[in-house]
Image (cartoon, coloured by chain):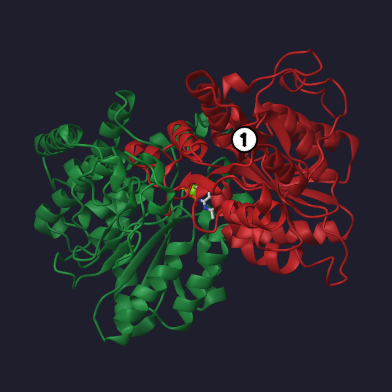
Chain colours: A green, B red
Amino acid sequence: MSDSFPAGLDGERLKGLYRALCITRAAEERLEILQKQGHVTGGLYRSLGQEAGSVGAAFALRRESDGTGDFLAPTVRAAGAMFLFGATLVDFFRQYMARETSPTRGREANVHWVDYQKGFVGPVSPLGTMVEIMAGVTLSFSLRGEDRVGMVFYGDGASSTGAWHEGLNFAAVQRCPLILMVEANQYAFSSPTAKNTRVQSFTEKAPGYGIGAESVDGTDVIAVYEAVSRAAERARGGLGTQLIELKYFRRLGHAQHDSQEYVDPALIAEWEKKDPIACFHRRMVDNGWATEQELETLWHESEEDCRVAAEQAIAEPVPHGPDAVDDVYTDVTTPHPWTRGVSPDPRLA
Amino acid sequence: MEQPTPEYLQKTRRGEPVTLLEAISEGLFEEMSSDERVFLLGEDIGTYGGAFKVTRGFLEHFGDRRVIDTPIAEGGFTGAAAGAAHMGLRPVVEMQFMDFISPAYDVITNYIATSLYRGAGPMPLVIRGPVGGGNRGGPFHSQNVEMAFFHTPGLKIVYPSTPYDAKGLIKSAIRDDNPVIFEEHKGLYRAPALREVLPDEDYVVPIGKANTVREGKDLTVVTYGAMVHKSVEAAELLEKEDGLSVEVIDLRTLLPLDDDAIIESVKKTGKVLVVHEDTRTGGIAGEIAIRISEKAFEWLDGPILRVTAIDSPVPYSGSLEDYFLPQTSDVVKAARYLAGY
Ligand SMILES: Cc1ncc(C[n+]2csc(CCOP(=O)(O)OP(=O)(O)O)c2C)c(N)n1
Ligand SMILES: [Mg+2]
């Protein structure tokens, strides 16, 4: 059978890919349950139909847990990449539930957290910023002569920001080993891609920066894996910054509060047929890379892992209000509000 | 073909109460109807009607030449608004969240605010959008941006707290020949308690004029935005429990500040507490305190005090954010402390 394996992957690695897809979807489905139960603070964003983009891309990078591997800046729709880089499910749920035990101690939301050992830096909300940040991260790789590449995700809409352009141009000029993943899911909130760019494909932008680019079916996890493997090889080989366009569709609203009335339901139904997990499942079974039974087990294990992790996070405490003053500086203490003291005195503020 | 005015934008005409959000929608709609130079720019304001639905139905009524869904490029479309203003149009820019005004900081402070002074003519444009905390939005969907712009001569900054003021002030802002930053507190947008019936006529509220929302003689609270309501709540409690008579001044416009209204009240009460939701250091309380010191020092019977958010980014978790934000109980405590002088 093994000579039929695609892209130099073996059965175990293929199942690893499948599992990562399942974990990503199951984690987000669990979040929806948690939100209905009132456990989630703030907004909830799904990557339904986009899981293969984040998973296939991260799978092609060198992931280490000791701070020497490749480096990732995901978006909220690229949690799959973060999980592959070692982000734990329990931390993911802690973040969404703003627990004291979360990596940001309740200061920040969803995937907005950082682990330099595992090799990722979560985004901030202002779009585009992380291209600039990752230009600097990957600049440091080349300045130090380290064999590492960086990967930054952004949606099609974010490509309109000044930060996206300035960061990308800087990276290109400096030949930074950076791969920019364009999550071309055809909408930015309610705005179709045509309201953000005149080009048909984001690869058309690449010549303007003098960088390499490829467009790939973002629902096909193997195709993404292969395209990113090629881009990473080019980036590592001194060819500098690369752009990969993931073509797919945002099958749910911008966030759970958006019922997506502005999208033709027929279009959503069309893209449902290209569900990345269902398609990969069929391919795995049809090619004999895994059995139906094995894949079923992987899905159920993923669901169970998510359930258990969520239970753990629910049981953990929320932050202690007065800790809000911590960590504003390394060496300066932020005063508490003077009116919260037992005997208020404005000179204490 | 122009569509009829949507039914939900005719509440005032029907004598029904409106929310602060609806008041802003009505104000925008009326200005666009009466002045064809007025047009809108912003992300998702057309088809979607804006992230908070302030411009719901505008695209259908005014068309996509006057309700422009922009690329996600705050710097770009604010600069474009300035160019259109040069040519005699009166653009109203929506920031999806005011936190994202930052990419436009350069063009606002360096270009727009200096235009008249440089001899390039007035800049009749409005930049409006949601601000403020309490929604568990975290560091990038909760900020108050006034003080990032307060230090820039040439800008006006407006921050209404009631539907009446919001409608009157958005109209004034659009008619103003100077650039106006217009802040809309998310927590007030749909607050049921604020709903009120507005006059069914073309009224404006002047920019630069504060409003005494509650008369008092023992002490003055100077505030604006969402804190107006917390301050009034505190004042009522202080009256009931302590017999204190607290005056509450709603600034409504932050730049230019209405010195006269503040000073007049200080001369009456002799005690001032400034309350703002924005963070502490560099907050507007500092500017207000120095003006009082300059103009009414002899009338003071106690220190000028402030209740504000703490000096940190806006935290995401509810428990942290509640601690971060000034609460009614803080206003009460501070007022009691001040009353002791
Ligand atoms: C500078 C900036 N402006 C506006 C926003 C508000 N906003 C958040 S997500 C979003 C749409 C993003 O679309 P896209 O980049 O295509 O990503 P997608 O949501 O489709 O994954 C907008 C406008 C923001 N976060 N940052
Ligand atoms: Mg998109």
Q: As displayed, is residue B21 above or below residue A149? A: above
Ligand 1: does it lie within 8 Å of the C-beta at label 1?
no
Tell me if mark 1 has few (under 14), some (14-19) or many (20+) residues whose alpha carbon lies within 10 angstroms of its own. Answer: many
Q: As displayed, is residue B286 above or below residue B321? A: below
Dividing the picture into quadrants, the one containing residue B101 is bottom right
* Residue at 55% across, 32% down: B231
User: For mark 1, what is the residue?
Assistant: B48
Q: Residue B303 or B122: which is nearer the viewer?
A: B303
Left/right placement of residue A246 relative to residue B24 reads: left
Counting from the top left corner in percent of width and height, residue B201 is at 87, 24
Q: Residue B306 or B43: which is nearer the viewer?
A: B306
Dividing the picture into quadrants, the one containing residue A277 is top left
* Residue at 83% across, 53% down: B124
Q: Residue A140 or B318: which is nearer the viewer?
A: B318
Amino acid bearing label 1? Tyr
Counting from the top left corner in percent of width and height, residue B182 is at 69, 45
**Callout 1: chain:** B
